[in-house]
Amino acid sequence: MKTALVVLDMLNDFVDGTLANSAAVPIIDPIGQLAEAARGRDDWMVVYANDAHRPGDVEFEVFGEHALAGSAGAEVVPGLSPQGDDIVVPKRFYSAFTETDLDATCRVHNIKKMVIVGQHTNCCCRHTTYDAFLRGIEVSVVSDATCMFAPMAGDRYDDMQAEAIEYLATFYNSQVLETSELL
């Protein structure tokens, strides 16, 4: 049985590009620490689930064009680049499971636990957690390694982040952890 550290949408467009998010900058270091630790454990693996959109994708109706497959905006930010045996799952929808090979990846690698980090707690993290929950995968979310989309939260950022984390814990039985608990 393996645990997957699932890094969601830590992409150039989501940190300082088209959909720049100042709240993403402070989570880069904790995610990097977690990825390094996971790579050193035989029973862990690192999975990147990254937006890799195609022209006309439905998500553009909400957020505008972003993270086009093959563009610089769809690349993982410097300092978090996938390494060696890491798996990269391109996605076109909020959940890392929707129309991707993540489900097959979980079965092939016997992933029974996921640790969710990245962006955005109330969107991609939430939808991915739901789909993992439906598949019987135990999920933990790292509160100091996830973030909301700050431009939409305004001065309610801290409250909205706490509410999103609480939602994952309440409805998907997610364990809420901090980076220090996993290192």
Image: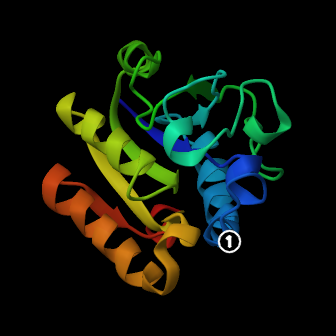
User: In the displayed structure, would residue 140 be above or below residue 159?
Assistant: above
Q: Position of residue 60 (x, y in %)?
A: 56, 37
Residue wearing tag 1: 22
Residue furthest toward the bottom? Answer: 155
Mark 1 Cα shell of 10 Å, populated few (<14), some (14-19), many (≥20): some
Q: Residue at x 26, y 57 (%)?
A: 168
Task: Give the image quarter of residue 98.
Answer: top left
Which colour scheme appears in the figure? Answer: rainbow
| Left or right: 167 in relation to 162 | left
Q: Position of residue 182 (x, y in %)?
A: 47, 61
Q: Position of residue 1 (x, y in %)?
A: 34, 28
User: In the displayed structure, would residue 90 be above or below residue 25?
Assistant: above
**Type of the residue with mark 1:** Ser
Q: Residue at x 42, y 17 (%)?
A: 99
Q: Position of residue 23 (x, y in %)?
A: 61, 71
Label 1 residue SS: helix
Residue nearest the viewer, comparing 113 with 117: 117
Residue nearest the viewer, comparing 30 with 69: 69
Residue nearest the viewer, comparing 86 with 135: 135
Residue nearest the viewer, comparing 60 with 183: 60
Q: Quadrant of the C terminus?
A: bottom right
